[in-house]
Amino acid sequence: MTETAPRPTLEAVAERAGVSRATVSRVVNGAHGVREALAERVRRAVEELGYVPNQAARSLVTRRHQAVAVVAAEPETRVFADPYFAQQLRGISKELTAHDNQLVLLLTEGREDHARVGRYLAGGHVDGALVFSLHLDDPLPGLVRGAGLPTVFGGRPHWDDGRDDVVYVDSDNRGGARSAVRHLAGLGRTRIAHITGPLDQTSAADRLTGFRDVRSGAGAELTARGDFTSGGGERAMRELLDRCPDLDAVFAANDLTAAGALRVLRERGRRVPDDVAVVGFDDMLPVAEETDPPLTTVRQDIEGMGRLMARLLLRGLDGGPAADDTDAPRAAATTAPGVVLPTTLVRRATA
Amino acid sequence: MTETAPRPTLEAVAERAGVSRATVSRVVNGAHGVREALAERVRRAVEELGYVPNQAARSLVTRRHQAVAVVAAEPETRVFADPYFAQQLRGISKELTAHDNQLVLLLTEGREDHARVGRYLAGGHVDGALVFSLHLDDPLPGLVRGAGLPTVFGGRPHWDDGRDDVVYVDSDNRGGARSAVRHLAGLGRTRIAHITGPLDQTSAADRLTGFRDVRSGAGAELTARGDFTSGGGERAMRELLDRCPDLDAVFAANDLTAAGALRVLRERGRRVPDDVAVVGFDDMLPVAEETDPPLTTVRQDIEGMGRLMARLLLRGLDGGPAADDTDAPRAAATTAPGVVLPTTLVRRATA
DNA sequence: GTGAAAGCGCTAACAC
DNA sequence: GTGTTAGCGCTTTCAC
């Protein structure tokens, strides 16, 4: 563990270049109106001295930090068995990096953490926040609002009651569910069941809605509640099989659920997809590709969601990345509170 | 996206409490030598005004940031199919939070990112770095050393040549591998094969070493190279089966590899564990619990590794969490360059 | 014990 | 165009 050496200041650069601090500042910040000859001298001095601006000093006066907080509750990062969250993080990181912003990660565990996070956000350490809040009773959204920070949510918040100005990015859970169920119907399946996720999460609720959109006539006996885990999938599958031995297809709310369902189907001697076709949701690779047979599922652009969240936030921060919308055509509806990313059906072997 | 309100300063608190800024500063920073009566008045003022110190101003003078960078290369977060990294992050976050430090996440993608990260680290924005560097050709370690920042590595670095002062935290890959192989031997297996990981990673190399520790007599035909993916596991398993049709056990370098091996074994009509016993490594839940049959594997305390990394770094930072070692007995050998966390064998159904 | 004052490194008016 | 100057909010000697 080495000691960090004293770093050159603006002052030092100015002296070396034979100009004033103000001029160096202008050059460093890419301002116009500095004669090219001078600018060049400054740049050389910067180079020679290995000058790097002191962000603390800069923040002190600009009140900007070039930093964004990513807030997520422990459950979020666990329920999805993590790859999900890590991928969003990757997307967020890429976008922030591209615009020279830092990512401050705030993971919360329980009540005591909420106070801490609230304090931090209100403390003016970051310019904005990206918040993952999926549960009904989550106190995070309130906290963030209290802090008065520009914020973009990951996933449709519960209180997206239309009148609000919440900005969020979600994937098209409802549409994805519809396409899954339509696919099953297109295969000629007529007794299509659905294993839901925990319905206090909007993603699960929206997937159920999508299922109902297509199977409005489906009786309640064709729906069983799961919890996004494979154990829950097993339980629900047994329940369904007991109630409706003649079912010929299952749309599971996520891949883990589908994995559990597949196990029970095999155990009960049902052939997949011959007797019962199965479709999952998420396309969580380590799961979807490893099931037996490999899972047909609905893929979301998770990294894209993260990237879009960051972009939306940055845009809200004074100016931000204005019109470089080239690779975000779907984000066009920028005036809308929420942006919904499309999903695609990935056909493997279960349906 | 709301605007952030102007926040109260030290000055304001001082005025309200009828004391000088210096006194408020002392109280806020928990310094001694302030009469209790005054201190109390200050605390009340802080409370009433909702004062939060401006970290930028503070950093400017103290040169401390209460922030630590976590640096990871994209491959790291992908190879392990992510849950691994997310868990370490959780451990790191907990520990940093407990000591009031922020976590700045730096994910790198390619060469251009390295320059950026190097600049950032050298830029004096953080007090230290936690670096994940597993590959032979990884430029990250060099970068960090160049930045002259206190650093702790995740996983044994390649250049841990004994003479060095690198601090790292790793799990006991070699010992874990030994216990896996011994377990198989204890089951009466005599033809034990090993599917390795990518040997340019120390974890994979160490697991191979552990295998050899126990099966020093094993012929080369009982070892096949994998790459930590299930596809690689499949290929290697086929290879092994072709070469040694009589093998009766397999130690796979990680769970994904084991999952692939299991598929091939089933496809070739081998019963698990009756004909061939299988042990994995990692205990990556979404994989290990979902295989058929559920996988016997070696568990590492991933979150604990993260926590320990953070603790070690913090300790290196002026004083740090000195003697609160209560829940880290294994970290006792603090003078040693590396700390190795124990692993445990988790018995499920494959061995 | 407490306060006054200097200054951390930078940006942004404002003069020139 | 470029330099001068005044802080941003805080910690920290140094007197008292």
Image (cartoon, coloured by chain):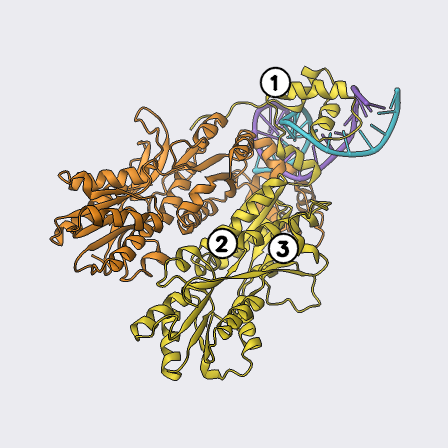
Chain colours: A orange, B yellow, C purple, D cyan
Q: Which residue type does callout 1 highlight?
A: Glu
Residue under label 3: B152
Q: Are marks 3 and 1 on the same chain?
A: yes
Residue under label 2: B85
In this rendering, is residue A250 above or below A115? below
Q: Of callouts 2 and 3, which one flags the residue occurring earlier in the amino acid sequence? A: 2
Quarter of the image that includes the C terminus of chain B: bottom left
Q: Is residue A210 left or right of residue B221?
A: left
Q: Of callouts 3 and 1, which one flags the residue occurring earlier in the amino acid sequence? A: 1
Q: Secondary structure at mark 1?
A: helix
User: Is residue B203 something one can see in this rendering?
Assistant: yes
**Residue for point 67% across, 41% down:** B64
In front: B348, or B212? B348
Point out residue A152 in the picture as x, y percentages from the top left corner: 41, 35
- Checking the image for residue B48, the label placed there is 1
In front: B195, or B3? B195
Point out residue B14 in the picture as x, y percentages from the top left corner: 70, 19
The quadrant holding residue B8 is: top right
Q: Secondary structure at mark 3?
A: strand
Instruction: Tell me which chain the residue with mark 2 is part of.
Output: B
The quadrant holding residue B18 is: top right
Instruction: Tell me which chain the residue with mark 1 is part of.
Output: B
